[in-house]
Amino acid sequence: EGDASVVLQTRPKTKRPPLYKVLLLNDDYTPMEFVVHVLERFFGMSHAQAFEIMLTVHKKGLAVVGVFSHEIAETKVTQVMDFARRHQHPLQCTMEKE
Ligand code: TYC
């Protein structure tokens, strides 16, 4: 209150919510067709797009499959992990702050 720096508020800060990258990780066992299906089903990709991203993960080890708000990213990760577990595939999906 007595400090001058406190009252020197300048431009109003427009706070955007932080975004999160959803990452898909490669493994040796999950079938390629299953990964393509996951990308179509949970990330709204076309078959061609999904195939391309799947191959990127297969070759590079991982890829960003989407960028979302925290809540949506968490939902995507949970959906993919549950779906993979139900089909007994070791597919891993994670999220990280952009
Ligand atoms: N590497 C897997 C295979 O050869 C395919 C695969 C691709 C697995 C992407 C996971 O996120 C993944 N069958």
Image: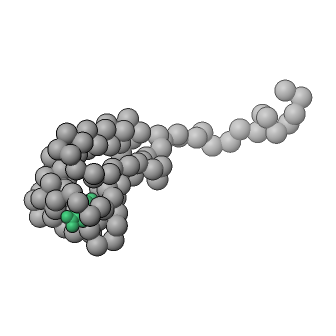
Q: Quadrant of ligand 1?
A: bottom left
Identity of the residue drawn at 16% across and 59% down: 31
Residue 36 appears in the rendering = no
Q: Is residue 9 above or below residue 37?
A: above
Give the camera-side residue of 31 and 14: 31
Residue 74: x and y in percent read: 36, 38
Q: Is residue 6 above or below residue 62?
A: above
Left or right: 76 with respect to 2? left
Residue 16: x and y in percent read: 48, 41
Identity of the residue drawn at 31% across and 56% down: 24
Q: Is residue 53 above or below residue 45?
A: below
In the image, farthest residue toward the top: 1
Q: Where on the picture, by quarter, is residue 48?
A: bottom left
Residue 55: x and y in percent read: 22, 69
Picture colour scheme: one colour
Q: Quadrant of the N terminus?
A: top right
Identity of the residue drawn at 32% across and 51% down: 92
Give the camera-side residue of 80 and 75: 80
Residue 1 appears in the rendering = yes
In the image, farthest residue toward the right: 2
Residue 11: x and y in percent read: 63, 43
Q: How many marks?
A: 0
Q: Is residue 68 above or below residue 3?
A: below
Q: Where on the picture, by quarter, is residue 53?
A: bottom left
Give the camera-side residue of 72 and 1: 72
Identity of the residue drawn at 22% across and 50% down: 89
Give the camera-side residue of 33 and 16: 33
